[in-house]
Amino acid sequence: MTQKDATQSAGLSEPERVELLRTMIRIREFEDMVGESYLRGHTAGSMLHLSVGEEAVAAGIVKAMAPEDVFTTHHRGHGVFLARGADPMRMFAEVFGKSVGYCKGKGGSMHIADIQLGHMGANAIVGANIPISLGGGFSLKYRDVPGVSVAFFGDGAINQGVLYESMNMAALWKLPVVFAVVNNQYGMGTRVDQASASLAFAERAETFGVKGAEVDGMDVEAVYGAADALLRYSREGNGPSLLVANAYRFYGHGRKDPSPYRTKEEEAKWKARDPIALFRDRLVTEGVITAERSERIGAEAVTEMEEAAAVAVTQADPAPEELYTDVFAEEL
Amino acid sequence: MREIAYREALREAIYEEMEQDENVFVIGEEVGRYGGAYAVTRGLIKEFGARRLVDAPISEASTVGLGIGAAITGLRPIVELMYVDFVPLAMDQIATQMPKLRYMTGGQLKIPMVLRTQGGTGRSAGAQHSQSLEAYCVHTPGLRVVMPATPADAKGLLKSAIRSDDPVVFIEHKALYARKGAVPEETCTIPLGKARISRSGSDVTIVTYSRMVLIAEEAAGALEAEGISAEVIDLRTLSPMDMDAVSASVGKTKRAIVVTEAHKTAGMSAEIAARITESNWTDLTAPVVRIAAKDVPVPATHLEKLSIPSVDEIVDAAKTLCGE
Ligand SMILES: Cc1ncc(C[n+]2csc(CCOP(=O)(O)OP(=O)(O)O)c2C)c(N)n1
Ligand SMILES: [Mg+2]
């Protein structure tokens, strides 16, 4: 599939397009705010990986997902979960280590999840969520549920062995699995071409019998179009697919990483294609929204996130007894 | 009571659980058409079809991961790793995913999954197919670890493991598959986490599990002829460990020998001995004796036997402990 086809197949209504913009802006504001909180020492954990710059990938793919779909994410998963409908207050609370957090404060930034929303877990071992999503797809097919299982992971996971094991099994058994590669060009300080001899990831997938596609991850409608086509393909029983969405990590690997391994020119080049600005300008040019309305959406998101963070920060820490709960489902 | 082999007992457990719960399925290398490397699942594919007896490629990590994902989303997978020696290939999924996802998500995720595998010596299979790696799993909170010695325990514990809502690593022993023993006809489960006194005695407690129970029993028989009454405790479940049973026994006998087929250094025998020392320090008349596999890779051929605990070693240790 070419990038052009994907854009054309998007076909979203005007309200849907505005909501897509809102989702991206909310992700940006959440990430900026949680980053600020981190710098101010409100967060419980030492690790914070922000998805600023990758909003179009999260919003576009999640937009194509259905309620019965399940998914896992990597350590940079806030955006995906927010797009899926997470409550920002409980997300902040989780990052702040509070008991009302999604995981009672036991997961932290890298493990925020809610199974009620189909989130099978955010994973901090690069690539480890891939086989777990394979299992989600196996289970959907086994139970005859018409859903799709989506694994979100970074370019760094592209060279983990489990991806190839999992792609093979997904293709072998025609499982409804979408391998969603958030290619933000770096795994920590290693540029994607410094880790992979061939960058033809979609072609790699094709050799496994997995339908491959690549898309401009800064163009939310292109991402949506590509994801929609692949999710449909899997939902209709045709088997797995792999989508490479090319984007850029605007912050460093962690919030405090100054990214000395990349050039200012490169950063400027990508930031000039900021996925939010790109889409907002398109909507304004096409007369879908006014500049004022888009600013209002931005202001609303700022207020929402400020309030959510302010509420979260006052919540109680987990009781000491919580240390021992949730290890097992059953006592012996 | 009828007698059936350990492997048949296991097969019955899988059959019964699959029959009564549509969500139970088996996945692993050669489990379907081939019938399992040690024939545990033989014939089951005829009963349940390839949908529920899934022949996996040689991809241990992703097969275990698949089981985890399937368990999270409502199925009850029985994942078979052909040898416990392949646990390290899937170690991330086994030690870092399966036991932690529930805790990390504040109790949201349930992982009702059994990882069946088999280990130990007895077939001269060489250093890469004869290991006893249970400590790798026992070391990790969030896993149940079960190692049955008898056909009845194999069946009853496997049924409990399949019904458990938590991940259970179920390690069978390759040298026990053909051994027969009494197994009740009617369906019965055996609770996880409970040890079994396999032989009562009053002078010395031998704590062990899996195939070493047989060796310990043999030693106890020989000791009886010499006037020493040994109690043999089969732990059956290593995690959690039934220290109440062990401690009560040592409280009575005042002497303890721990026997494992696993290596001695930083292995299960060290853990068990340390716990006995903590719980029964004032009862003990002498330090706990550990008899474990020699700290060498398991050799093939006739050397294999020399690397693991023998009846004679146990007898000698018991005699020394009892002051003879
Ligand atoms: C198996 C494993 N190896 C190494 C790490 C350390 N690590 C954490 S994130 C990361 C880079 C991952 O890059 P990528 O997959 O592209 O995700 P991104 O951080 O770019 O979103 C590394 C090496 C890890 N967490 N897990
Ligand atoms: Mg990356």
Image: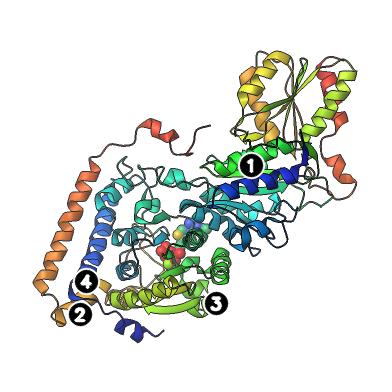
In this rendering, which labeled residue sits more in front, label 2 or label 1? 1
Q: Position of residue B278 (x, y in %)?
A: 61, 21
Mark 3 C-beta closer than 8 Å to ligand 1: no
- In the image, is B280 to the left or to the right of A159? right
Where disc 3 sits, the SS reads loop
Residue ID for mark 4: A16
Residue ID for mark 1: B158
Instruction: Please say if A196 is above or below A114.
Output: below
Which chain is home to disc 1? B
Q: Which of B288/A139 is in front? A: A139
- For residue A282, the mark is 2
Same subunit under labels 4 and 3? yes
The kind of residue tagged 3 is: Gly
In this rendering, which labeled residue sits more in front, label 1 or label 3? 1
The kind of residue tagged 2 is: Arg
In this rendering, which labeled residue sits more in front, label 1 or label 4? 1
Mark 4–mark 3 distance (CA, rounded to whole Å): 33 Å
- For residue A209, the mark is 3
Q: Residues within 10 Å of mark 4 (few under 14, many from 20)?
A: few
Nearer the N terminus, badge 3 or badge 2?
3
